[in-house]
Image (cartoon, rainbow, N blue to C red):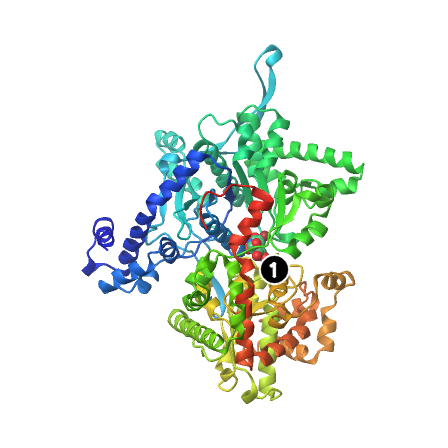
Amino acid sequence: MREYLRELNFTQGTVLQRASTNDEYLALARTVRHYLMSRWMETTTEYYRTQPKGVAYLSAEFLLGRQLGNALLAADLTDIATEALASLGIDIAELAEAEVEPGLGNGGLGRLAACFIDSLATMGVPAIGYGIRYEYGIFRQNFVDGRQVEEPDHWLDNGSPWEFAHPEHEVTVSFGGSTERYTDGEGDDAVERTRWTPGWQVLGVPYNYMVPGYRNQQVNTLRLWSARATHAFDLKIFNYGDYAEAVRAQTFAENISKVLYPEDSTPQGKELRLQQQYFFVACSLRDFIDRLLPGGFDLRRLPERICFQLNDTHPVIAIPELQRILVDEEGLDWDEAWDITRRCFAYTCHTLLPEALEVWPVELLGRLLPRHLEIIYRINDDFLAEVRESRGDDELLVRRMSIIAEHPQRAVRMAHLATVAATKVNGVAELHSQLLRDKVLADFATLWPEKFTNVTNGVTPRRFVRLANPGLSGLITEAIGDGWVTDLDRLRELEPLADDPEFRRRFREVKSANKDRLVELLARRDGIDIDPGTMLDVMVKRLHEYKRQTLKLLHVITLYDRLRSGELDLADTVPRTVVFGAKAAPGYVMAKEIIALINHVGAVINADPEISRVLRIAFPANYDVTVAETLIPAADLSEQISLAGKEASGTGNMKFALNGALTVGTDDGANVEIRQLVGDDHFFLFGLTEPEAAAVAEGGYRPSAYYEENASLRRALDLVARGEFSGGDRSTFEPVVSNLLGEDRFMVLADYQSYLDAQERVEAAYRDPDAWSRSAVLNVARTGFFSSDRSMRDYLDRIWHAERLGGA
Ligand code: GPU
């Protein structure tokens, strides 16, 4: 408390009586971080002193969510802080609301990185996260006439108490220019080498964030890089007297870390994005070599000290960068350097969609990073020679496997580069890893079968159960003690309690209180009015055609149609609130149309005085980690309905199950493993399987055939086409309808009937609250596997072979 008042007075420069909520939040945040500081320094010093083998998680995104609650929890200060503030007349909850979450990621991939660093700290693994400190994170989403409008995310405006800038540790990063061969040394010692003369440079300034382990005295580091203009650059121009030009140059450099690209799974190949990628990777490698290794360290031993884990292809340019450092700067010969480089990297692939696989046009890469392009060519030449040697002169095979694509333009396939270089390549769920091996990277898996492995994703139980669901956490702890927070398999001990009526009653009480919290949030935040007495049916994730929000919507429209026609009896229908949350990439036109359609359908249904008693749509704008934390614990039904073979894993699916929602889902991604664990009786499965979907595609899929044969599907689509949800205007949603009827790449129409049938089973099950809550409790008890702590153990065993120093 004394600490807190000190921060308020001396750092925030205000007094209790006059402090704003933001002042109070900042003072508390600084008090907590102060408390964690000595552990942080100790952890850092310990790693430096013992030089264990560690992990560097390279990721262009870390979708952290709010920091305060997590820091208090990790430090075990929540109760103390709550009481101390209460004695000053301050409500800690109100103050926590002042924190703007750092939205430095798009969705699953970025949130996964945040879960992983939490688990690594909690498990005492020597690990560092490296990424970009975007000045603007993921855009804020607004709806205007139901259409998405984006606004910049000024997350740093009210102060950022969790970061520590270290301008004194800046790193210089080079771009452009040219390369030349030269002879180093004389006579017998002479060697041919390459010199890169860059065209321009920027500085990377590190910002450190604490990553506190859960009550274990460990605090790891997340280091995010921010771009600055070099001093030399602007000095030179200032001396010419061109002040305006100097300032412009600064802006140019600082643009690099200005904004997060908002495309999720569909990279746009923008030059600035490649600059971002190289920028943070070059800073991170330099930082690791110069600052985390002892002076004079022999880089030939680098693989004994580190594994750089590549979070998808975004950081893959690190591979030629390390090779360049070893060959051009350290003077190692190519083959020795390449052997070292290969042993330092592992690659995680997060997709199966061809359009999500990053490629960089050779023209662009060569202009921005000429030396790296040469290195990539050489890597490719050696690799293709290896392929020819082992597989004969199969030129088709060689072309398929080449790191360089020739069509539609010459471009570097980053996934191929990563696969060639990495010690291990992993997918993020069993099915995904199998499809990587059998389809997407099949040629590589034939050549190097032992390279491929799986690590099923996980989520941190600290944030997504303990913090987000205090009611359920209390109930669990009362039943089995609190060990589950760091050993989630212990949730199994709840299984017998699924048969205890009293436990189920209390479980329902918790769910109902969580719904009340959500109702309160949506009313306050969005002016949305929902009834906590209804079934909460939730679909939250990025808007993507493969995730099939339109399938959910067709179900809703069918319910509406049947209720209106009297085919369904209003009095005998289970009341539902269907909640959507989804951002669309700003340039993804179809996704934005689907958002508008959801909102328009919602407007019509919610305005119907009769039907809205049993069916409502809530689509709060700007779904983010903070909203997820209130929404997920309140959900009854979790929608995981991607076309089989398209969702690499999904992680929302895990969060819902762990919070006692039942899943309606396809046999896709980690749904497969969820269903195996919870059992068929407690999961609503529907839809084509991956082999079935592949067979349908093979045979020539005709969506219109389903339309013609299925009357209720026809009625639902006709309602949209006739303008029922667009004030009679038939043109408004014509693109959505004609896309479904004409192409329907993700087979929404093929799975429609099966989905409807599954929803009937959902409704029937929900009518029996006791049986439903039994299933819900079993979902909690049986999904401890999806802790990101378990994912980290798998990475440690199968990929990193790093040491654990302390921790849980
Ligand atoms: N994912 Br590629 C993203 O969130 N963004 C991307 O750019 C790519 C993948 C997701 C997958 O779609 C999701 O299935 C997975 O659970 C998540 O990454 C984490 O692995």
| Image quarter of residue 339 | top right
Question: Which one is in front, 484 or 303?
Answer: 484
- Expressed as whole percent of the image width and height from the top left, the position of residue 751 reads 68, 70
Which amino acid type corresponds to the residue marked 1 in the rendered image? Ala
Secondary structure at badge 1 equals loop
| Badge count | 1
- Expressed as whole percent of the image width and height from the top left, the position of residue 374 reads 62, 31
**28 left or right, relative to 394:** left
**Relative vertical location of residue 453 with respect to residue 554 in this rendering, above or below:** above
**Relative vertical location of residue 254 with respect to residue 623 in this rendering, above or below:** above
Question: Which one is in front, 311 or 178?
Answer: 311
Q: If the image is split into quadrants, where does the N terminus sit?
A: bottom left
Question: Which one is in front, 81 or 215?
Answer: 215
Question: Which one is in front, 605 or 694?
Answer: 694
The outermost residue toward the top is: 187
The residue under label 1 is 670
The outermost residue toward the right is: 393
The reply to whether residue 478 is visible in this rendering is: yes
| Image quarter of residue 19 | bottom left
- Expressed as whole percent of the image width and height from the top left, the position of residue 257 reads 45, 45
User: Which of the four quarters of the rendered structure image does ligand 1 lie in?
Assistant: bottom right
**Relative vertical location of residue 380 with respect to residue 359 in this rendering, above or below:** above
| Image quarter of residue 313 | top right
The reply to whether residue 264 is visible in this rendering is: no
Whether disc 1's CB lies below 8 Å from ligand 1 is answered yes
- Expressed as whole percent of the image width and height from the top left, the position of residue 231 reads 38, 32
**Relative vertical location of residue 213 with respect to residue 404 in this rendering, above or below:** below
Q: Residues within 10 Å of mark 1 (few under 14, many from 20)?
A: many
Residue at point 44%, 40% (across, down)? 253
**344 left or right, relative to 747:** left
**202 left or right, relative to 709:** left
